[in-house]
Image (cartoon, grey):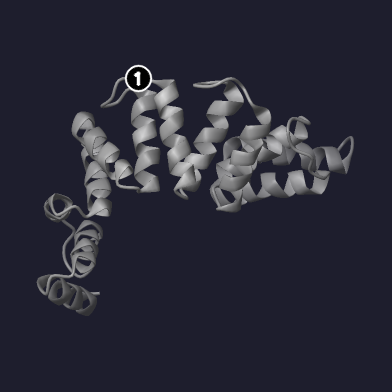
Amino acid sequence: PRRARQLTVASCQRGYRHACLLLADLDLDGVGAVASRARAGERYAGLCDEDVTEACWKLANLLAEDHRHDDAARLFQRACADGMGASCNSWGFCLFTGKGAAWSAIDALAAYRKACELGDPYGCANVGELVELGVGAPPDPTAAVASYRQACDDRVDAGCARLARLAEQGVGAALAPDEITALYRRACDDAGVPDACHALARRLRADRGPGA
């Protein structure tokens, strides 16, 4: 780790911004040196000032953890505008929770949709949840299924659990019983999604029959 850090420092000193971003990550994680959240934040801030979008997003996450929600939201919005899907998802969360931004379900859904369009699977899962519940738009189970499927295909296990639930209810998705069970198992085993684990246990008991 120390040698890797030395090489990263040298690359950063030569002006490679991605190396400087990696160096900030190493500072945060304590790789090759004592972890320093403050030093990482300073590096992220400097890179963000140089319009390194990912640095702005990472700095925003640190600010949010420090409950500086107004500052974090501004950076999430900025990085989203620059085309970073993960930051659009974070910006959507700010809008949906009213942390650092005026609450708006409609704007939150728009931000989540942009995140999904930019390839962020968590944004897709959030789109699915809002359109399923009719928050920010009329309820649309078919659209919810499509968003959950997209999230699930990109390894967001909550999307798999929600897709399985709708399929089990016969809403918007037609999946074989074994496929439904497999989705619940995946969400439970890989991520410990509580609802998925409960559903999986229920289905396995049912498959074993009375008295099992």
- State the residue at coordinates (47%, 40%): 123
Q: Position of residue 129 (x, y in %)?
A: 55, 30
* Residue placed most toward the observer, 72 or 40: 72
Is residue 37 among what the camera can see? Answer: no
* Residue placed most toward the observer, 124 or 41: 124
Figure quadrant of residue 133: top right
Residue 208 is left or right of residue 11, and the answer is right
Residue 208 is left or right of residue 50, and the answer is right
Indicate whether 170 appears above or below 103: below
Is residue 131 among what the camera can see? Answer: yes
Residue type at tag 1: Trp
- State the residue at coordinates (48%, 45%): 117
Quadrant in which the N terminus appears: bottom left
Q: Which residue is mark 1?
A: 103
Q: Residues within 10 Å of mark 1 (few under 14, many from 20)?
A: some
- State the residue at coordinates (74%, 36%): 167
Quadrant in which the C terminus appears: top right
